[in-house]
Image (cartoon, helix red, strand yellow):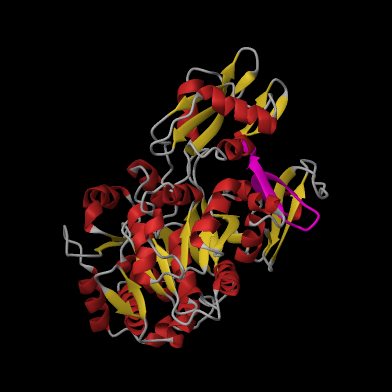
């Protein structure tokens, strides 16, 4: 099927149910579906043909989902843009993927003025919320499409529009080790992703599902929102993540499904309003983006109930490469295989996941190596970067760049990113393991562990710690706890306290920024 067909199937379940709301405006499924047709007709009438790139540059707003569905219906290629990125980085990426169409919000008018000047293949820019600087508003653009009289048959099934290999998106990698690369996502990959999510997230007992989104819709939250549409959910869109507002929104909207990165979960658990709300409506509370500290995972189950779950994936293998379901998490939190709170789950049904040595050998249970995968979920290739694609597809598997192991029951445990491994005194120390130990301390709200240059050790294990509100803890106490849990080699040699950790636009801890002051002037960024 085409990417848009999955939304249509959900819309047919309850056409008069509210599909999208921001708390003040609400739009029924039939209205959203018709808006997507109008946007598609307008794009076709304006000259869209073939796999032309269309970007959306906006904060969280219901109109973002309107545009996304419209360009998918038109057969354009979705270019998600995280407006929190530096403008230069976004400009470089949009130029690289050869952006033809740009939907934007007036809040980013200054940025878009430069994009319009410097994107050589840009054909038209449309402002979502108002006419601006010579650009049509979205309403005006749709009206032109209506007047053009584009027949629906021009936007319906035709080869290669419905082909499994038809490109539907070019999704940017994180760009933490250089300029972001674009990953080609096809009908097959997108459809596989949505079918997995439908399989794992749908709950028969939930007759009126409600999905809460506060992370950027240009990132994983947008995928989660569209996936929830496949089973007819109402999507509640918050403009940004605010822990207090998020907690109250769960109760106010009777939220059944939601998604957050672990760092945002920690902010919820530390918020003073945590005990003041009713969370009994929750059925799926998905954590993804980085490993979850087991003690925090256990605490979250105590607060939010048996709804916590985790998935593992990346742009190259999106969203649910592995799945740790709520029932496994709930049992682990009560002492049944408690080690599984540190797992990201088992391979989802359309993929194989294994662990590989550097020479291509598949490793057995308990052996540490690189996590690899294959199957129809795996994204097709990097956009116009064949050598980069070949580098991550060695030995017939996709290479994630993550280090981990598999237990005898098939549960995958991520130890660290390859690039985050610290070599100290000749020993390999995985920063994620040290971070998990530090996050066991109730006085700690957040932390990051990095290696810094050291004449004796090569790299010294260093922790940057954020204390919980109203709490304090001494450096010696953190180090002593780690020595007891992990031994002297893995324990930090020093601890630095900060009010907050820098985050990437995707909400992950920015370790590159943390390392930079320590490694400035060094000939390389390893010891």
Q: Nearer the viewer, residue 31 or 346?
A: 346
Q: Which quarter of the rendering shows the N terminus?
A: bottom right
- Start-end of magenta stretch: 397-419
Query: Which picture quadrant has residue 329?
Result: bottom right
Judged left or right of residue 89, residue 463 is right
In this view, the residue in front, 200 or 419, is 200
- The location of residue 383, given as percent across then percent down, is 53, 54
Task: Reply yes or no: does residue 407 show up in magenta.
Answer: yes
Q: Residue at the location (48% across, 36% down)?
A: 443
Question: Where residue 408 appears, x then y in whole percent?
Answer: 81, 55
Give the tally of numbered discs.
0
Determine which quarter of the picture holds residue 63: bottom left
Q: Position of residue 374 (x, y in %)?
A: 70, 59
Query: Would residue 191 be found to the left or right of residue 407 on screen?
Result: left
One can see residue 287 in this view? no
Q: Determine whether 311 is above or below 294 in the image.
A: below
Residue 246's place in the image compared with 147, above or below, is above
Residue occupying the point 28% across, 75% down: 26
Is any part of residue 455 visible from this angle? yes
- 91 or 377, which is in the foreground? 377
Q: Main secondary structure of the magenta part?
A: strand
């Amino acid at each position: 099927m085409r990417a848009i067909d999955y939304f249509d199937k959900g819309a047919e379940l309850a056409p008069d149910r509210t599909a999208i709301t921001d708390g003040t405006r609400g739009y029924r499924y039939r209205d959203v579906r018709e808006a997507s047709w109008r946007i598609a007709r307008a794009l076709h009438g304006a000259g869209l043909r073939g796999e032309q790139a269309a970007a959306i540059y906006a904060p969280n707003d219901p109109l973002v989902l309107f545009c996304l569905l419209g360009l998918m219906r038109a057969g354009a290629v979705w270019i998600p843009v995280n407006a929190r990125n530096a403008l230069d980085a976004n400009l470089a990426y949009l130029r690289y993927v050869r952006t033809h169409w740009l939907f934007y919000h007036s809040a980013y008018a200054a940025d878009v003025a430069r994009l319009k000047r410097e994107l050589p293949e840009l054909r038209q820019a449309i402002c979502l919320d108002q006419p601006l600087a010579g650009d049509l508003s979205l309403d005006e653009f749709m009206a032109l499409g209506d007047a053009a009289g584009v027949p629906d048959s021009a936007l319906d099934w035709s080869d290669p529009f419905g082909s499994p290999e038809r490109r539907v998106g070019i999704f940017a990698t994180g760009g933490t080790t250089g300029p972001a690369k674009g990953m080609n996502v096809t009908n097959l990959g997108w459809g596989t992703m949505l079918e997995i999510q439908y399989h794992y997230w749908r709950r028969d007992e939930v007759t009126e599902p409600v999905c809460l989104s506060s992370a950027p819709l240009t990132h994983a939250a947008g995928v989660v929102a569209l996936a929830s549409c496949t089973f007819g959910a109402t999507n509640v869109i918050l403009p940004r993540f605010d822990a207090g507002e998020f907690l109250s929104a769960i109760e106010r909207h009777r939220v059944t499904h939601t998604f957050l990165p672990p760092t945002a979960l920690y902010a919820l658990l530390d918020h003073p309003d945590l005990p003041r709300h009713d969370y009994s409506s929750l059925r799926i509370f998905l954590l993804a983006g980085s490993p979850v500290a087991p003690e925090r995972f256990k605490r979250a189950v105590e607060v939010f109930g048996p709804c916590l779950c985790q998935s593992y994936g990346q742009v190259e293998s999106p969203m649910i490469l592995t799945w740790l379901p709520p029932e496994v998490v709930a049992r682990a939190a009560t002492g049944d295989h408690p080690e599984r709170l540190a797992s990201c789950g088992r391979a989802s049904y359309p993929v194989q996941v294994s662990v590989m040595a550097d020479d291509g050998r598949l490793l057995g249970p308990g052996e540490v190596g690189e996590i690899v995968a294959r199957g129809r979920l795996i994204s097709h290739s990097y956009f116009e970067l064949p050598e980069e694609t070949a580098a991550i597809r060695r030995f017939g598997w996709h290479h994630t760049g993550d280090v981990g192991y598999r237990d005898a029951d098939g549960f995958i445990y991520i130890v660290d990113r390859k690039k985050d491994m610290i070599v100290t005194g000749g020993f390999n120390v995985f920063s994620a393991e040290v971070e998990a130990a530090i996050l066991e301390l109730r006085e700690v709200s957040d932390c990051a562990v990095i290696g810094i240059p050291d004449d004796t050790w090569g790299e010294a294990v260093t922790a940057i710690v954020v204390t919980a509100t109203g709490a304090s803890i001494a450096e010696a106490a953190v180090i002593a706890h780690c020595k007891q849990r992990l031994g002297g080699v893995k324990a930090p040699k020093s601890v630095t306290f900060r009010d907050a950790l820098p985050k990437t636009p995707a909400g992950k801890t920015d370790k590159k920024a943390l390392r930079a002051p320590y490694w400035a002037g060094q000939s390389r960024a390893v010891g």
